[in-house]
Image (cartoon, rainbow, N blue to C red):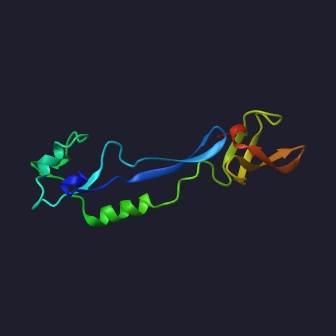
Amino acid sequence: MEQQNVVIFLPLHKYEKIENGNIVIKKEPLFSGYIFAQIDTENVNWTSVRSTRGVSNIVKFGNDPAVVDQVTIDNLKKIDSLSPEPYIKHGDLVRVTSGSFRGIDAIYQASDGESRSYILLEFMHQNQRLSLDNAKLMKI
């Protein structure tokens, strides 16, 4: 598309996920299967864009391609630049899935590096703040 002088934009949704006990940032398209293309209709034949490898179709209203206003594109770019959505936030309820505290529910407090987190659990009628491996926690 860039060889055809078409500016493209793929807004992404970023979120945290726990993989192998580590918090990793994942990215996926905000609109799966769609990209936004800015086409200069005076200099580019938009029907040739449809023939580009990987393009299955163009969203149209009648015979004309759909037009998305610049304000909407700017708002999508703001979303695209946001920090990742956290997998677990302060105050979320979590369950310990293995180890000595297996099956106990706790309140998530904060990250303790990439692979550990602080939780607050009630143990022997007292609140205890512990640091556990993320692989042992499950969001409820």
Number of marks:
0
Residue 20: x, y in percent?
64, 37
Q: Quadrant of residue 53?
A: top left
In this rendering, the answer to whether 52 lies above or below 36 is above
Foreground pick, 122 / 26: 26
Q: Quadrant of the C terminus?
A: top right
Foreground pick, 88 / 28: 28
Residue 36: x, y in percent?
28, 53
Left or right of 86, for residue 136? right
In this rendering, the answer to whether 23 lies above or below 81 is above
Residue 5: x, y in percent?
20, 58
Seen as rendered, the residue at the extreme right is 124
Q: Quadrant of residue 51?
A: top left
Q: Quadrant of residue 57?
A: top left
Left or right of 39, for residue 101? right
Residue 69: x, y in percent?
25, 63
User: Residue at 27% of width from left, 65% of height from top?
Assistant: 70
Foreground pick, 105 / 113: 113
